[in-house]
Image: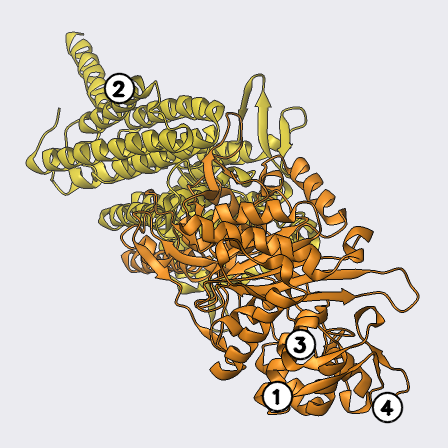
Chain colours: A orange, B yellow
Amino acid sequence: MNKQIRKLAAALLVLYVVLFVQLNVLQVGKKEALDSHPLNNRQTIRDFNRPRGPIITADGTVVARSVPAQGGDQFKYQREYPTGDLFSNVSGYYTYSFGSTQLEKTKNDILMGDTAAQTVGGVFGGSDNSGSVLLTMRADVQQVAADALGTREGSVVVQDPNTGAILAMVSYPRFDANLVATHDTQAAEDALNFYNNYPGKPLLANAYQENYMPGSSFKIITTGIAFENGVISMDRTWPSASEWVPPQTSDPIQNYGGKSCGGTMAEVFYRSCNIPFAQMAVELGPERMTAGTDAWGIDQKLPIDLPGAVASNFKYANGELIDFENNMPLLAIGGFGQANDKMVPLHMCMVASTVAAGGRMMSPYVVDATLAHNGTVLERTNPEVWKSPITPATAATLNGLMVGVVNNGTGRPMQLANGVQAAAKTGTAQLNATGEPQRSHAWIVGFAPAEAPRYSISVVLKGTNDEISAGTGGKLAGPIAKQVLDYLFASEA
Amino acid sequence: MATSPIATARRNSELGLVVMAAAITAVAYTLAALGQNSTIPARIIPFLIALLGLLLSAHVATRMLAPGADGTLLPLAVLLNGIGYVVIARLSERLAGLQTTWTFIGVIAFVLTLLVVQRPSDLARYKWTFLFIGAGLLMLPLVPGIGTSVGGARIWVSIGPINFQPGEFAKIALALFFAGYLADNRELIAAGTRRIGPMRIPEMRFLLPVTLAWGFAVAVMVAEKDLGSALLFFTLFTVMMWVATERAIYLILGLVLFSAAAYTAYQLFAVVQTRVSIWIDPWSQYEGKGYQIVQAMFAFANGGTGGTGLGLGSPTKIPAAKTDYIFAAIGEEMGLVGATAVLIAFLLMIGAGLRIAMRSERAFEKLLATGLTTIIGMQAFIIIGGVVRVVPLTGITLPFVSYGGSSLLANWVLLALLIRISDSNARRAGEVPDQLTIGERWEARRLRRIERRAGAV
């Protein structure tokens, strides 16, 4: 009988080995797949009972942090956003029932302390490994920009043109992440529904998740492409005209307000005549023009370190390639930023930055560094060149043209305090067809100081009401840019 | 008290191991409380004293009543019982209180069993009694008025305030019957006097009692929809027949019968079809019957290698975490490390049990030890395998670990029987002096008195 008992022992051993193998499959092999399964909220529950690091601005303001939850809460920690709605479009939200967005989502592992670098030596958990995210953005600048924008729909983006680092990026309308992060699921759902139904889409940042017709601010790009291709020079002059009929049509193109407009290169730029730029686009032709817009990063998703960024559009309309060869009027109108042109406000800031930085377009970023719990740097963002659409010479020429706009032209409202020389280009994008009530977006993009730029800016006010639609980019957006830039230079002193 | 160097060494190592198992339990209990409420449990000192007192009395009982027995079985049972208690206490304070009571009763039953059963061979004499006890216990839940169904299985008996699962005890009783009957008749069954083709068939009159008992038991368990127990019992019977007769044909026969029974059960019972379908694909039935098994898989994954830490996981998401699914709670909060420790504890128990069986020289004791060990080993495999989705889940308890009075009590009795056989082996091997048992001393005294009286006449 002992022979059988020995075999029985072996058989039972085999059965238990099978159990052990399956345990390994569940607890090690398929761990990640099971942990991240959509039906599984254990990870979420666990995460809400663990400390989660803060998101901090460059000037030390905490924009997101976890605090011990009030008594009676089902979790140990409550995520809160001390700056309210100011940084919600960047931090995103971190919720129990509705997932997380933006940096709360992309930097989740860092904040929870789950990256390999943070968990070394802590396999069995227990210790607080939570990391933090350090922004390039400044809370003071963000606040000034938000105040300047007020409750007008639109956005303000401020960048360091030399690195691409974003100093401020504010949109209106925006949302308060605290309302969504509450553990009261019903209240959180109500807040989300409210924001989803609110006009102007507060959950989407105008600054980088939407694009708008750029109007004349687009002329920086057209001029840049024309210089690069040798189609124009500073010696070129345009006769004064109020109408020009592009090829393939009999419908003439007019200047803003139907005025007669012309002169030297500098003059047509600061006066913002439309006809010269329509002619530049036509002279370049569809191939060179679209190659140029490609070089400026148009029709490509912006490479910012935040999810959900969209692309600007020139050669695509509603996802379809435009046949400019057989639609030259569209190309001509596109040359001065009308028709199908759509620019992301952040991208327009990058356009100003490109001129400011001698022709290099840097990748925009909001995360300066990620830090471990003890403060050591896990990863620091290295500035990267995204595009090089123009030569330093063209950049210098455009710089001069944009200085002219501030000193002599439509950009006069952006003349800065203390004699700091700014450079800019305005835009008033006409949204209405002829005969309809006027609707227009007001733009200004620029940088300062012109001789050695440290800040670039784009401001857009959406033409959603009569007040904005009646104004121009210079008059409406200019003062906002001035307010923000003046503050920046004053804060340096 | 009988002493010998070997006995002293065994009992001392047992004492050391029991203290270690108790310490692990106490530390785990404290950690679970810390993990849940960040406070050290207020009753930790009385808890420790009671725990140690209880376990030491079990140890002292072995020292006195079975000094030569294997020294690892008791500590392993203590460890499993302790881990189970900690997990139950972490899930429900009320059930923890009940489980404490049942553990006390279990240990008392352990001591009583050692006290009452002083020679294993005494049990062999009552094999027919055990058959009827076993059959009676099995049928009890089917009796109208006292039998109740919980979770689809009609395996409970309620008499007044007492609820219990007689099936847990029926298993032991039937193992005793099989061991007793097969020890007497194994050669007759093995020899086989009638020939059919190349096969030799034993006389029906030798085979009939066991097959009838087996068929009856399986039929009753199936009628009660207690599939886990039916499977366990099937395995127990097959293994005991095979070991007793030393003929592989019974193993093959068992497998064939099992396949046929499984197929029939699948065709006949919706519950079997459900169990199989959620075993194959629990995901599509997440909202319904598949919920628990999916949550169990999430629990294991959540635990990972080191576990979430006691009191820090979410085992409450599994409704049956205290009973059938307790292993998932262990896997979540103690991780692969803790779950493997439990597997190893069962393996060591199986090893100890089968070693006892092999050392035993009497067929009855050998078969009984084999049967009892098979019960523990297979029951743990069936339920753990169900929880980790190696086999379809059939609801039975994890021995010593799951919440449940009947199960705990029955397993402590089972443990006492194994220890009794082990001690008997040691006596026979001369490792400890084979002194008279208390019962035998009384009997001897009675005989002497009768002799004296007879002499006086």
Residue closer to the observer: B152 or A327: A327
Give the side of residue A416 with respect to residue B17, left or right: right
The amino acid beneath tag 1 is Asp
Pointer 2 and pointer 3 on the same chain:
no
Mark 2 burial class by Cα count in 10 Å: few <14, some 14-19, many 20+? few
Gap in Å between the C-alphas at discs 1 and 2?
A: 100 Å
Q: Secondary structure at mark 4?
A: loop
Find residue A235 and name its label.
1
- Residue B412: x and y in percent read 36, 32
Pointer 1 and pointer 2 on the same chain:
no
According to the picture, the residue beneath numbered tag 3 turns out to be A267
The amino acid beneath tag 4 is Gln
According to the picture, the residue beneath numbered tag 4 turns out to be A248
The amino acid beneath tag 3 is Glu
Find residue B49 and name its label.
2
Looking at the rendering, in which quadrant would you find the N terminus of chain A?
A: bottom left
Q: Kindly report which numbered mark, 1 or 4, lies closer to the viewer in this rendering.
A: 1
Residue at 91% over, 86% down: A250
Give the side of residue B35 with respect to residue B275, left or right: left
Q: Kindly report which numbered mark, 2 or 3, lies closer to the viewer in this rendering.
A: 3
The chain to which mark 3 is attached is A
Residue A457 shows up from this direction: yes
Pointer 3 and pointer 4 on the same chain:
yes
Q: Is residue A7 above or below residue A321?
A: above
Gap in Å between the C-alphas at discs 1 and 3?
A: 11 Å
The chain to which mark 4 is attached is A
